[in-house]
Image (cartoon, rainbow, N blue to C red):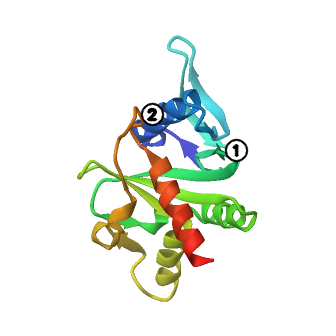
Amino acid sequence: MATWNSRGLRGSTLEELINATNEVYREKKLALVQKIPTPITPLNFDSETRLITKAYFEKDSTVDYIGVVQGIPVCFDAKECAKDTFPLQNIHSHQFKFMEEFEAQNGISFIIIYFAERNDFYYMRFKELKKYVDRSLSGHPKNFKYLELDDEYFLKSEGGAIVHYLKGLERDLEERDKEE
């Protein structure tokens, strides 16, 4: 049984930035994207501070966010990376499977990766993630490096959106149109 403790807050800064971005998108009527809470059962609860100090995950979660952008269904996960090498083990098999199934239903799946050391945000298309996963399954490293990434998918803050992933989505859709 997996349990939650202080490590469960990793990535919370990135999620706060994405949540703020999602609020900007909602206010501007560009998108409606929501954070999906991870279902937990508290084991230890400090009634004085009203904080859960220990809990277990009820089931595997899917992805961090799901919603719709101008009629296009999207789902994505947010990941932080301290160094220039991203370990694929950070993408759990149930998350990968959910994104794959979402894509099969004509939705758009992606990952937003925050490279903390460089203060860079990256929009990773599901197709690109699958390439790295497939590569690892054929005996290659179970990671990818910052320098392997496509410069066109690094995200810049714009129009009040700190993590302006709609720019990445726009490029993703353009690439999909070219591939058809």
Farthest residue in the right direction? 105
Residue nearest the observer in this picture, 105 or 49: 105
Front in this rendered view, residue 51 or 129: 129
Relative to 176, is 73 on the left or the right?
Answer: right
Report the amino acid beneath label 2. Glu
Query: Residue 9's spot in the image, x, y percent?
Result: 45, 38
User: Callout 2: 10 Å neighbours few (<14), some, many (20+)?
Assistant: few
Compare residues 80 and 27 and report the one nearer the observer. Answer: 27
Lateral position of residue 34 relative to residue 53, left or right: right
- The image shows residue 94 at horizontal and vertical percentages of 65, 62
User: Image point 30% across, 66% down: which residue?
Assistant: 146
Q: Which mark is residue 58?
A: 1
Determine contact: label 1, label 2, CB under 8 Å: no
Q: Position of residue 101 (x, y in %)?
A: 72, 65
Q: Position of residue 58 (x, y in %)?
A: 70, 44
Q: Is residue 74 above or below residue 105?
A: above
Whether residue 137 is situated above or below residue 35 in the rendered picture: below
Q: Secondary structure at mark 2?
A: helix
On the image, numbered disc 2 is attached to which residue?
Answer: 16
The amino acid type, in three-letter code, at marker 1 is: Glu
- Residue density around tag 1, few if under 14, some if 14–19, many if 20 or more, within 10 Å: some
Q: Image point 56% across, 62% down: which residue?
A: 173
